[in-house]
Image: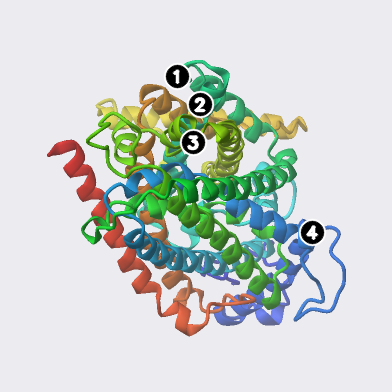
């Protein structure tokens, strides 16, 4: 019989319909044919994502990606990472100073760019595999078929990449790392955003946490499509506002002229939060990736776009940290031990703008208006970042729901409840899950046959409630833990995901099993050879993270 491209699973005659019979004799010829057809379908699907593409001269397909798609990618990368560094980075420089931080942060920038390049290659390979699966999918109307078509239109997501290039328990570990990063970064955004709104409204920020997280979560779940252009506009607005704030802060820094003390012994202090301040962009790239035309030139444009976006964040963060070090004392003064300082802000879990505004109010009252401007910037920045990263989480959860639905609709005996009378607590929990799963199946099948298509299906709703509910509960339980959540939990998730699993997926994607997967642009050999350097860097970050947690909380 015929075989699928990656698992070499036999297909029945109905599934092989449409494939020339002369090419169904061997696994090799079938796999090659399916992958060739997948490449053609991938181009058709790209046109589907871009309904207004023009037939212009380009490398292979004669099509170009609309400029607005690259602008959207540029701004969504900035929206995903800009804000974390502005709020949390400067307070970690109390001991290290500026020069050790710059060397550390520059190396982090190079590593994060490599992560983005590797993820772009993985997305290309996942898109080709996804298109090939569409070639072999059964025809006809069914909940499974409808879900498969929706998954294809949805494009490859992080969960799908893990399924295809990790598999088994590693996929679950990868999903947990992705969930850890998303949840922890959304918690930190929820805390920082509530603090900014509370400060502007003159109320305790703990009262703002619940409405902030609930309102913005509902917006991104039910209005994701409508919010896409809004995110780009507000990201441009917050970027422009930040440039202006950095410029004004530079003027104040020139007037204050606070000396900077550098100490290489404390180079590791800003290490973890630096990986978070530039990390996470790979989690939002899959949202826009399906709209990019699949050819070599457009993929190179995409790489240039994400590099420029991350480079913009890098430069703004470096300038911001330098100016704040020139304004805010690194350590408390012996003459004023309770005055504003970076170390004091770190110990109290405050964002970097709090001591900055305090100093400006006292020493430079002519610039007091900058405090209001900074609060407005934080409100816009955190709101946009929450929606962006929340949309990335939603995109991943949609992929998990699709896989869950596909497994549930199969006839696997693993989903049958056990009939044994002597049940352990594990089998009881399992049976509860199986029973819930059957009810979800029945409800979704009924909705499908009645022609009802809910905005949020039941499985997606269950996953949304779990993930975003977790964000809300932890944020409410730990309202002063902004820096701890950001530094330890978010860094653990992003470093595990970027440094370990991305490299593993890339190596597997280039293995013999997937050797016939054709993509428009694979990373050149010199870049690919850096994969283990990348892994080593992030393994060191993971070790440092775990040691920091042990030192801070258990010693």
Tell me, yes or no, whether the two marked residues, 4 and 3, touch with CB atoms within 8 Å: no
* In the rendered image, the vertical position of residue 117 relative to residue 439, given as above or below: below
Which residue does the image show at 73% across and 77% down from the upper left? Answer: 20
Picture colour scheme: rainbow
What residue did someone put label 3 on? Answer: 189
C-alpha separation, residue under disc 3 versus residue under disc 1: 14 Å
Q: Quadrant of residue 446?
A: top right
Q: Looking at the image, which is closer to me, 165 or 300?
A: 300
Going from the N terminus, do you reach mark 3 or mark 1 first?
Answer: 3
* In the rendered image, the vertical position of residue 81 relative to residue 191, given as above or below: below
Dot 2, crowdedness within 10 Å: few (<14), some or many (≥20)? many
C-alpha separation, residue under disc 2 versus residue under disc 4: 37 Å
In this rendering, would 58 be left or right of 461? right
C-alpha separation, residue under disc 4 versus residue under disc 3: 32 Å
In this rendering, would 17 be left or right of 29? right
What residue did someone put label 1 on? Answer: 206
Viewer-side label of 2, 4: 2
C-alpha separation, residue under disc 2 versus residue under disc 1: 7 Å
* In the rendered image, the vertical position of residue 555 relative to residue 217, given as above or below: below
Going from the N terminus, do you reach mark 2 or mark 4 first?
Answer: 4
What residue did someone put label 4 on? Answer: 50
What residue did someone put label 2 on? Answer: 194
The secondary structure type at the circle numbered 2 is helix
Residue 287 place in picture, x, y as percent: 63, 52
């Amino acid at each position: 019989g015929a075989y699928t491209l990656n698992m070499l699973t036999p297909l029945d005659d109905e599934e092989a319909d449409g494939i020339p019979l002369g090419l169904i004799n061997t696994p090799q010829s079938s796999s090659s044919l399916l992958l060739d057809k997948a490449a053609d379908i991938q181009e058709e699907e790209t046109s589907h994502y871009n309904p207004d593409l023009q037939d212009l001269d380009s490398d292979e397909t004669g099509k170009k990606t609309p400029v607005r798609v690259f602008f959207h990618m540029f701004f969504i990368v900035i929206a995903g990472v800009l804000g974390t560094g502005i709020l949390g980075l400067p307070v970690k420089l109390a001991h290290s100073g500026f020069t050790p931080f710059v060397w550390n942060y520059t190396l982090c920038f190079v590593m994060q760019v490599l992560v983005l390049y590797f993820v772009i290659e993985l997305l290309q390979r996942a898109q080709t595999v996804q298109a090939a699966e569409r070639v072999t999918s059964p025809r006809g109307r069914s909940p499974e078929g409808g879900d498969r078509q929706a998954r294809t239109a949805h494009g490859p997501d992080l969960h799908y990449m893990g399924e295809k290039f990790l598999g088994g328990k590693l996929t679950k570990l990868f999903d947990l790392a992705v969930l850890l990063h998303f949840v922890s970064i959304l918690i930190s955004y929820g805390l920082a955003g509530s603090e900014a709104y509370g400060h502007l409204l003159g109320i305790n920020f703990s009262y703002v946490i619940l409405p902030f997280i609930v309102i913005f979560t509902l917006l991104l779940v039910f209005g994701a499509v409508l919010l896409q252009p809004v995110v780009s506009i507000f990201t441009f607005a917050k970027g422009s506002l930040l440039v202006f704030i950095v410029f004004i802060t530079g003027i104040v820094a020139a007037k204050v002229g606070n000396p900077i003390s550098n100490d290489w012994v404390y180079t590791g202090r800003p290490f973890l939060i630096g990986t978070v301040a530039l990390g996470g962009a790979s989690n939002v790239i899959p949202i826009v990736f399906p709209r990019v035309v699949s050819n070599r030139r457009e993929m190179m444009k995409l790489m240039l776009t994400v590099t420029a976006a991350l480079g913009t964040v890098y430069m703004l963060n470096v300038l911001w940290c330098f100016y704040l070090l020139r304004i805010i004392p690194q350590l408390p003064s012996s003459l004023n031990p309770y005055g504003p300082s970076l170390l004091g802000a770190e110990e109290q879990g405050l964002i970097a703008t709090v001591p900055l505004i305090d100093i400006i109010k006292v020493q430079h009252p002519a610039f007091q208006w900058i405090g209001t401007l900074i609060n407005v910037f934080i409100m816009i920045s955190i709101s946009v970042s929450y929606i962006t990263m929340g949309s990335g989480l939603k995109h991943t959860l949609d992929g998990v729901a699709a896989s869950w639905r596909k497994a549930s609709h199969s006839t696997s005996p693993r989903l049958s409840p056990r009939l044994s009378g002597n049940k352990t607590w594990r089998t009881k929990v399992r049976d509860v899950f199986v029973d819930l799963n059957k009810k979800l199946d029945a409800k979704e099948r009924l909705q499908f046959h009645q022609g009802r298509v809910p905005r949020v299906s039941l499985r997606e709703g269950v996953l949304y409630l779990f993930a975003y509910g977790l964000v809300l509960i932890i944020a409410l339980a730990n309202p002063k833990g902004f820096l701890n959540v950001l530094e330890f939990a978010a860094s653990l998730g992003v470093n595990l995901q970027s440094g370990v699993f991305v490299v593993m997926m890339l190596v597997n994607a280039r293995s013999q099993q997937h050797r016939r997967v054709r993509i428009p642009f694979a990373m050149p050999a010199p870049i690919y050879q850096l994969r283990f350097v990348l892994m080593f860097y992030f393994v060191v970050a993971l070790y440092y993270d775990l040691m920091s947690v042990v030192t801070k909380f258990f010693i």
